[in-house]
Image (cartoon, coloured by chain):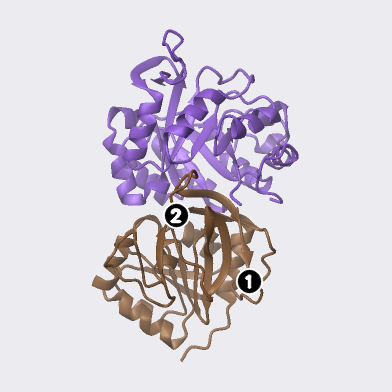
Amino acid sequence: MRVTVIDYKAGNLTSVLKALRHLGADTVVTDSDLSLVESAERIVLPGVGHFAATERLDRTGLTDAIRASVARGVPFLGICVGMQWLYAGSTEAPGQPGLGQFSGSCSRFAESAEKVPHVGWNSLDAKPGSRLLAGVEPGEFVYFTHSYKGPVTSDTAATSFYIEPFAAAVERDNVMGVQFHPEKSGATGLKILTNFLSWKAQVK
Amino acid sequence: MITKRIIACLDVHAGRVVKGVKFVDIVDAGDPAKQAARHAREGADEIVLLDITATHEGRQTLLDTVRRTARELFVPFCVGGGIRSAQDAEQVFEAGADKVSVNSAALNDPMLIDAIGRSFGAQAVVVAIDAKRDPSAANPVHEAQVYVQGGRKPTGRRVVEWAREAEQRGAGEILLTSMDSDGTRAGFDCELTAAVSEAVGIPVIASGGAGTVDHFADVFGRGKADAALAASIFHFAVSSARSLKEELAKAGVSVRLPC
């Protein structure tokens, strides 16, 4: 299985690549080569940092290439900011659109006595029937580090609770995203990445 | 619900762990990669590797160690010691670390925090602070001082102010070590930890003084810590992060279990 990992120069890809390779995937990394997206069997968009950094995807043509591949049925996984990018946008960078696969926009956690960013291991409440989260038992923990989060909608595959319920995973057909870091979430995270890699895709 | 983190700390010198663990197979005692993997397997929520060599010649050894340790490690992994520039940090990230911890270099050049945060995100920058209460001050806790060189050299900076500045510059977490408590096994400095935790909006990792499971419960409660560093506790009080967390759960602390 060949996985195309998108590099948009926001943070470090080493951990994601390491986890994918550990699970037997061949990985190729691109920051501009559209052919690697057009021929991709799987696409992973990692991301830590600021939503504004996704502007690079538009500038390099990667956004359009990803949109086309996703429309053909290529399985796509966005991680952290990579998941947030699947929504219409984020209040972190107003004016910078996301891919718009899921309705609503991402926003910062509400002001409260709790600390923001939300850093640490939190439990998942997965919706039955999620393919991405198959085999993940209620209450399994995953590792988060983020200040912005996506709204809970009908496409939410799992929620977590910090200050308020938020979307921990989204999934519709071949488009998936996780707010947490599966590459840093021990056995649970590897199980989720395995589900993504073994997904039976129907690519046109 | 969010859980309190138990972070296993490995002190490494010239590629070997220098503080061994009583319960480990003696053959593996000195290898950071094996010890990190064992801690992760036994329930640690995160691994910190602190390089105490911190010499120029030792950098390549450290990077090799980080690379080997990160290879099969799928929990957050932080590396500290001798990181003096954004380039040093970049090498450590490329070797497989998720976070770097900076201490005296950030005090010398606070812009280092901004630089690493800008390139790698705030979540990747941990600012380590070695703190001592100031017994001569009106408020020894709030006027606690920042030290460097293992607690020998005062910097003239107040701990709470430096933690606030670190946050403003883009640090993602504070690793607070009480030099008064370190090595005493008499408990964390909960007053100091709470003072820092209340002063900043980012997580605070408490370090120094753990001798019993109750000390951890105390620093998560009264000390308002978000995480705690565990090192020598594995020599005498509990055998693993998992057993520490099982005891903490009984005391009502929210921890990642099963793990």
**Chain holding disc 1:** A
Q: Amino acid at mark 1?
A: Lys
**Chain holding disc 2:** A
B185 w.r.t. A179: above or below = above
**Residue at horizontal 41%, vertical 46%?**
B124
Res. A23 in view: no
For label 2, the SS is loop
- Residue A109 circle label: 2
Q: Position of residue B27 (x, y in %)?
A: 68, 37
Q: Amino acid at mark 2?
A: Phe
**Residue at horizontal 31%, vertical 50%?**
B119
Q: Position of residue B254 (x, y in %)?
A: 66, 44
Q: Give the camera-side residue of A61 and A126.
A: A126
- Residue B14 circle label: none
Q: Quadrant of residue A99?
A: bottom left
Chain coloured brown here:
A
